[in-house]
Amino acid sequence: MKLDVRPADSGTQAAELKNAEKTPITHSMVGRADQDVIKSHFHTKNRDVLLSNDAKLDRLLEEESALVDENARNAKVAEIQRYVVEQGYAIPLFEEPQVYGAAPYVHGVSFEAVARPSFYNVWLSKKDK
């Protein structure tokens, strides 16, 4: 396998991504703590990162989006993920290491479901001398 890394500005990259023959692989991700994120990512009427015309995939995504039961949604998402991988549409790799530090007198830092820090309840105690 040969990999050519071609640096470019974001406008050039966005234009080139529309031609799968020129740029057949790309990084794409959306972080949201809801199963419907898969529809916003892959459906042809949404983000459509696959640039696909796959009616079956659209149908599966629409079925998932219409479900209200969490277990049923999780099962449908698993089916969609298997389908996407079996079709060779995506390689599901994701790692986003983040390191945060705080002094001992900083309290209340928390994290959202997708690992973004939340400082809403942060407070400071007195510093030790």
Image (cartoon, rainbow, N blue to C red):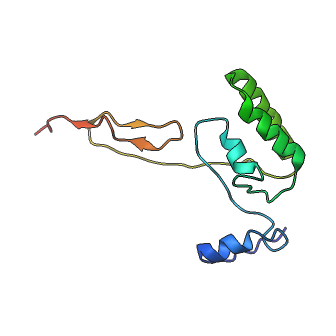
Q: Nearer the viewer, residue 104 or 64?
A: 64
- Residue 67 in the image: state x and y as whole percent: 73, 27
Residue ID at (81%, 66%): 24
Q: How many marks?
A: 0
Task: Report the residue that reaches farthest toward the left.
Answer: 129
Q: Nearer the viewer, residue 107 or 1?
A: 107
Does 69 sit above or below residue 64?
A: above
| Residue 117 in sight in this render | yes
Which image quadrant: the C terminus?
top left
Q: Nearer the viewer, residue 45 or 129?
A: 45
| Residue 105 in sight in this render | no
Residue ID at (84%, 44%): 57
Q: Quadrant of residue 108?
A: top left
Left or right for 37, reference 87: left
- Residue 84 in the image: state x and y as whole percent: 83, 45
Left or right for 95, reference 93: left
Q: Nearer the viewer, residue 32 or 8?
A: 32
Q: Quadrant of residue 25?
A: bottom right
- Residue 123 in the image: state x and y as whole percent: 24, 36
- Residue 121 in the image: state x and y as whole percent: 31, 34
Which image quadrant: the N terminus?
bottom right
Left or right for 125, reference 17: left
Residue ID at (62%, 75%): 11
Residue ID at (50%, 41%): 115
